[in-house]
Image (tube, coloured by chain):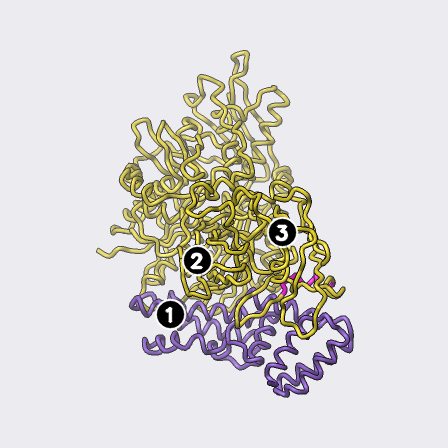
Chain colours: A purple, B yellow
């Protein structure tokens, strides 16, 4: 890896998402994720870059840490789902692992959902959010909430949709 | 002359050194032609130090001055279970050193464990140098995968004392996989079943050509071949007690004879179906006549002594396979590591568990050193083709209020990695927080290993829900942990590399380096009176070995330190710069319901609870956080503060049912904001962290209306 490339990547590491970092499509399967992790590590693993200058080694370390994080998220379907949601919402390109687990737990709550209606309207709202149809998302989430008034996930999503609508 | 890099397997019972040059790997035998060297150190009357089989021969003759199995003690706290166990079975004297560390006292000289390790390393270095004809001061050292950071650091210290540069601390099973798969272009998924003298490790790896990815690692640092010996020792000692009414365990010389006999019997059973154990004159009875032990031990009986130990190892395997997301039949190979895996009874059990024949083409005693040598070569060469993607074997956690911990990096997370979690202060206007770093899988502070701590102060104080402290943990490829705390509002920062709490301070280290014990190791390799391990006969001590006096001071009856000694490590409140009585040093994860589950802090029962979560629909503030039986499975509500994160709940999937009952786990910050925490009665931080050992049943049950603890309180 060229020193200029390393430095450039280290500089923009906070702006690219895990898929971009690992050169993966959003729909990549688990085998692809592993292959991409291995391939990316080949360039950025600190062991492969021991002989670089200290400042470059540091840049490599920064990248390698993010690569591990990306892999730890994308290889795990639960975490990955939580991360994808975050990307959809445009609320960041990074997720802490504990955070992803927490979100995944909430997600699984929603999936199991107490009421079929709540679940159904939430699904519709999810579709709306993906399409960035904020108005429809708000309506569907409001409806979902009438069936499950204390569903925090629904409420949070509603807040997001309202924010976007504004 | 080139300073060549070697691979060293510093084992509990035996050590091995190997070198890899241009892809060719050689184990370097010692002066007696043996590929492994006993990890035993004898301190002579004149202060000279002998390492290896020559020293081992002295276990019977000179038990008080012969140090063995020291790896079991390295990087441990003096009050740990393992140290108590070693005190019960080891004939050398184990004493307490500075900062709850362990020291070994021999002939009025006190050695730290890294020094003992350094003596063994110096011997191995000298073996390598005499075989290679050039300096070998750089090495990859292996440790059990399940070694915690304290043990790893202490191992590094040992190398430094021995005058060696450590290129990498490598996990033993990973090294074994390297030795197995290196340069073979394999695409396989393998398990490494590593049963050493003192520890058991299991790793599951994916080998993709020249990339070695560790999928999961698990282990038990209290399980090894020594335990098998102990079972035989127990059998012999119990039978002798029954027959003669004499407890051989109280006699250092007799105990060592039992130990040697047990180990020889074990080794013999790798080849034979039955062995004769004969220990003539094991002890002199009260009547002045010597007594002997003679007994046959069949492989089957031996196997039955080990059943539960093997089951324990397979439970650990279950865990590793599950974490790796594979089942036994998915594996393309099972690699056996460690001398004890030569035992037919173990091979049979492994075969049954993994439903396949374990690989036989690697020598279980040499494979780890060979893998270390391969890694040493690739780390020293410019264009390394092969590399390792390892994981952290133990979770890194941070101490939070109520004697609990909160994981920041879970075990089996790939390294290097950096993770940040946000915390707030435990109470309003708190001026500093103690950041304590633990390693382990329990949610209880007392059941995890304290790696280190530092105090973070000078941040902008405020209400506890206003203070936002980001704590970042980073683990590098060497497995070294560093921790940074940062005030999110002001950007003020403090960081530390975790310093070894149970090891050596800088000043101790410089004293030790000055003392230069490693230089006292006699590496002239004179022919030694090595005890021939003649399989069918377990022990044949020479007549001169018989102790003239039967009873030597007991080493077994050492008072067990109290469990709560960990608390003694916590800072003395009187010595702190900030008043701790009030500004308690505990952090809490904001909204961490775990705080309510267990703790000493009194919550006023009728505390008003205000809901500040900006939810469009006002959820009733009702939380039932039920503590499941297993603390490690405890429901956890965690909040992440800050712009890019939202409050959220964590809980094992099995707990979601509780949420279906209209229960809101997201109370977190509100709870804390609303509940009044009364600390005025707290004298010190111990009052909080000591919670778990005072009354393990003390739980906070939250049902939304009532916040109460048991009346133990603060």
Distance (Cα) linking label 1 and label 3: 38 Å
Task: Give the magenta range.
Answer: B649-657
Judging by the rendered image, the residue that carries numbered circle 3 is: B315
Residue found at x 40% / y 71%: A44
Q: Which of the image's four quarters has the N terminus of chain B?
A: bottom left
Q: Position of residue B605 (x, y in %)?
A: 69, 51
Which label number is shown at residue B483? 2
- SS state under label 3: helix
Looking at the image, residue B143 lies above or below residue A24: above
- SS state under label 1: helix
Judging by the rendered image, the residue that carries numbered circle 1 is: A60
Of residues B603 and B4, which is closer to you in this image? Answer: B603
- Of badges 1 and 2, nearer the viewer stands 2
Of residues B104 and A17, which is closer to you in this image? Answer: A17
Distance (Cα) linking label 2 and label 3: 33 Å
In this rendering, position of residue B483 left or right of residue B308: left
Q: Position of residue B685 (x, y in %)?
A: 52, 45
Q: What is the crowding at mark 2: few (fewer than 14 residues within 10 Å), some, or many (at least 20)?
A: many
Image quadrant in which you'd find residue B75: top left
Q: What is the crowding at mark 3: few (fewer than 14 residues within 10 Å), some, or many (at least 20)?
A: few
Mark 2 or mark 3, earlier in chain: 3
- Of badges 1 and 3, nearer the viewer stands 1
Q: Chain of mark 3?
A: B
Q: Which of the image's four quarters has the C terminus of chain B?
A: top right
Q: Is residue B203 visible?
A: no
């Amino acid at each position: 890896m060229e020193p200029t490339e390393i430095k450039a990547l280290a500089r923009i590491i906070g702006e690219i998402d895990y898929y971009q970092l690992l050169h993966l499509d959003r729909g990549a399967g688990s085998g692809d994720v592993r292959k991409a992790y291995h391939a990316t590590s080949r360039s950025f693993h600190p062991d492969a870059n021991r002989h670089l200058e200290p400042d470059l080694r540091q840049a490599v370390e920064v990248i390698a840490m993010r690569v591990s994080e990306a892999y730890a998220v994308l290889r795990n379907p639960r975490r990955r789902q939580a991360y994808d949601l975050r990307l959809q919402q445009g609320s960041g390109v990074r997720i802490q692992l504990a955070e992803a687990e927490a979100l995944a737990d909430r997600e699984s709550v929603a999936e199991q959902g107490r009421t079929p209606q709540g679940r159904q309207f939430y699904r519709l709202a999810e579709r709306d959010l993906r399409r960035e149809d904020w108005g429809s998302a708000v309506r569907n989430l409001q409806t979902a909430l009438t069936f499950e008034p204390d569903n925090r996930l629904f409420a949070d999503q509603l807040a997001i949709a309202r924010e976007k609508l504004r | 002359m080139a300073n060549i890099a070697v691979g060293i397997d510093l084992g509990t019972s035996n050590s091995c050194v190997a070198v890899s040059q241009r892809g060719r790997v050689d184990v370097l035998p010692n002066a007696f032609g043996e590929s492994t060297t006993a990890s035993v150190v004898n301190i002579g009357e004149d202060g000279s130090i002998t390492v290896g089989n020559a020293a081992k021969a002295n276990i019977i003759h000179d038990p008080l001055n012969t140090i063995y199995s020291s790896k079991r003690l390295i990087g441990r706290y003096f009050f740990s279970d393992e140290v108590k166990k070693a005190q019960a079975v080891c004939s050398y004297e184990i004493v307490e050193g500075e900062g709850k560390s362990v020291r070994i006292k021999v002939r009025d000289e006190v050695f730290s464990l890294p020094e003992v390790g350094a003596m063994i390393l110096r011997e191995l270095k000298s073996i390598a140098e005499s075989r290679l004809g050039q300096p070998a001061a750089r090495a990859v050292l292996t440790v059990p995968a399940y070694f915690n950071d304290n043990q790893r650091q202490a191992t590094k210290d040992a190398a430094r004392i021995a005058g060696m540069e450590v290129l990498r601390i490598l996990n033993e099973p990973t090294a074994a996989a390297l030795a197995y798969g290196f340069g073979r272009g394999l695409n396989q998924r393998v398990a490494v079943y590593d049963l050493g003298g003192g520890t058991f490790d299991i790793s599951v790896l994916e080998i993709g050509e020249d990339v070695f990815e560790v999928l999961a690692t698990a282990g038990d640092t209290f399980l090894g071949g020594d335990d098998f010996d102990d079972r035989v020792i127990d059998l012999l000692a119990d039978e002798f007690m029954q027959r003669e009414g004499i407890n051989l365990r109280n006699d250092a010389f007799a105990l060592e004879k039992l130990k040697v006999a047990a180990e020889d019997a074990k080794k013999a059973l790798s080849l034979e179906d039955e062995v004769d154990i004969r220990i003539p004159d094991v002890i002199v009875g009260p009547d002045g006549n010597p007594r002997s032990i003679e007994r046959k031990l069949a492989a089957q009986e031996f196997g039955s002594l080990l059943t539960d130990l093997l089951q324990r190892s397979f439970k650990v395997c279950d865990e590793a396979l599950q974490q790796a997301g594979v089942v036994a039949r998915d594996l393309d190979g099972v690699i056996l590591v460690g001398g004890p895996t030569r035992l037919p009874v173990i091979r049979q059990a492994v075969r049954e568990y993994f439903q396949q024949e374990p690989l036989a083409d690697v020598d279980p005693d040499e494979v780890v050193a060979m893998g270390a040598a391969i890694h040493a070569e690739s780390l020293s060469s410019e264009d390394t083709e092969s590399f390792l993607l390892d994981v952290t074997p133990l979770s890194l956690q941070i101490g939070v209020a109520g004697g609990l911990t909160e994981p920041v990096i879970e075990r089996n997370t790939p390294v290097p990695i950096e993770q940040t979690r946000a915390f707030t202060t435990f109470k309003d206007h708190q001026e500093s927080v103690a950041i304590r770093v633990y390693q382990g899988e329990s949610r209880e502070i007392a059941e995890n290993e304290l790696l280190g701590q530092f105090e973070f102060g000078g941040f902008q104080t405020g209400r506890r829900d206003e203070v936002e402290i980001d704590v970042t943990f980073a683990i590098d490829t060497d497995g070294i942990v560093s921790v940074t705390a940062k005030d999110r509002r002001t950007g003020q920062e403090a960081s530390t590399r975790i310093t070894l709490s149970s090891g050596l301070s800088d000043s101790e280290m410089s004293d030790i380096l000055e003392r230069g014990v490693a230089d006292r190791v006699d590496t002239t390799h004179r022919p030694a009176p090595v005890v021939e391990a003649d399989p069918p006969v377990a022990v044949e001590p020479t007549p001169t070995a018989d102790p003239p006096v039967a009873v030597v001071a007991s080493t077994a009856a050492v008072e067990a330190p109290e469990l709560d000694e960990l608390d003694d490590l916590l800072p003395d409140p009187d010595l702190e710069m900030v008043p701790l009585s009030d500004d308690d040093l505990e952090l809490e994860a904001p909204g961490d319901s775990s705080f309510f589950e267990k703790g000493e802090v009194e919550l006023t029962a009728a505390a008003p609870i205000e809901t500040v979560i900006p939810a469009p629909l006002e959820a009733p503030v009702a939380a039932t956080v039920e503590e499941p039986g297993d603390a490690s499975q405890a429901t956890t509500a965690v909040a992440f503060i800050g712009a890019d994160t939202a409050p959220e709940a964590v809980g094992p999937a099995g707990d979601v049912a509780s949420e279906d009952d209209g229960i809101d786990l997201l109370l977190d910050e509100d709870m804390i904001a609303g509940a009044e925490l009364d600390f005025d009665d707290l004298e010190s931080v111990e009052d909080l962290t000591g919670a778990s050992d005072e009354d393990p049943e003390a739980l906070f049950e939250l049902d939304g209306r009532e916040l109460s603890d048991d009346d133990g309180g603060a």
